[in-house]
Image (cartoon, rainbow, N blue to C red):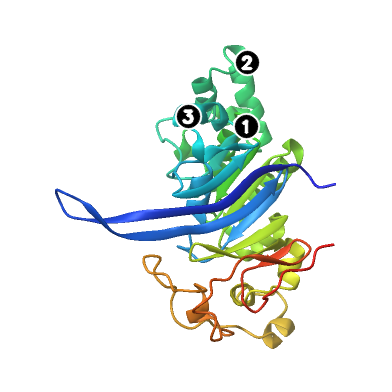
Amino acid sequence: MDKEIILEVKNLTKYFPVTSGLIRQRKVAEVKAVDGLSFSIKKGEMLGLVGESGCGKSTVGKCILQLHRPTAGEVLFEGKDLCRLSDRELQPLRQKLQLIFQDPYDSLDPRFTASDIIGEPLRIRGLHRGPDYRKRITELLDIVGLSPYMADRYPHEFSGGQRQRLGIARALSLQPSFIVCDEPISALDVSIQAQIINLLDDLGEEFGIAYLFISHDLAVVRHISDRVAVMYLGKLMELADRDGLYASPLHPYTQALLSAVPIPDPAVEAERPIIVLKGEVPSPLNPPSGCVFYPRCPKSFESCPKVPPQLKETSIGHSVACLLYPTSWPKP
């Protein structure tokens, strides 16, 4: 039996206006950062969101959390459309929706101790007062693998990996059911990355937390995610379970991304084909018509500039937006 869906995104769109004029500004163009994304996440599931830098991954996470208000679409969390709620109506739901930032150096206030950083959400919500407050701080430090005696240290006294653990403890303090991880390991040393990945994985299993794990590192996403969504220029190219995507990628863009991931076997690495994409990523100010990937696609044909491909399910749990697969999988 499938797990219950905790988050459902329908046709999520975010355009940023480009204005001109000093006194009387007028909109002259739009940056199409996110353009019609749809996916869902189940309780306790980790969905990896991958793609090149600038494709709109972080914007998706911020739109889900309503840090950016979407231009169009729906974000259904526990059955409620967050896009239709006012800031006041969102407040009760904020503690269930948390964010782990990319940079563990800039995301922590240098004037706060570790105890202050972790405890700030508790103070704002009026939770765990008195002796319970200190007990909760100790529990959270222990959960993320930090010693209680570190509670009075300042951020500059921690290593990069320890700082990211502080950020994770802060996100966990209000017992959220969904966390957006915005490239949480990209600023860390490789030796520390594995520790943070394993920590997130363990916490997800222990507390049933659902994650949106944003990354450009496909090797990391393969290790930690249950399903993987591939983005390009604001659109979703492919969505599948982890094993299905890495074993049998369908979209030419996904195939190109995976061909660039090194394999720790010299014999296999020497024999496998490497797909080199031509050209540069187009500007989101003026994306190509039809399929946004066609100018760089090695398999494009005459219909690609004319027909925008729709995300279609080609097999159980595997969807792709590509005209090479014109029909959906016939469901029973």
Dot 2 or dot 1: first in sequence order is: 2
Residues at marks 3 and 2, CA–CA distance in whole angstroms:
18 Å
**Quarter occupied by residue 319:** bottom right
In the image, is 296 to the left or to the right of 269?
Answer: left
In the image, is 155 to the left or to the right of 164?
Answer: left
In the image, is 49 to the left or to the right of 28?
Answer: right
Residue receiving disc 2: 132
Give the residue displayed 53% in from the left and 58% down from the top. 36
Q: Amino acid at mark 3?
A: Thr
Residue receiving disc 1: 141
The circle drawn on residue 246 is none
Where is residue 41 drawn, in percent x and y? Answer: 67, 48
Where is residue 249 drawn, in percent x and y? Answer: 69, 73
Residues at marks 1 and 3, CA–CA distance in whole angstroms:
13 Å
Outermost residue toward the left in this view:
23
- The reply to whether discs 3 and 2 touch (Cβ–Cβ < 8 Å) is no
Q: How many numbered circles are shown?
A: 3
Dot 1 or dot 3: first in sequence order is: 3
Where is residue 167 drawn, in percent x and y? Answer: 54, 39
At mark 1, the secondary structure is helix
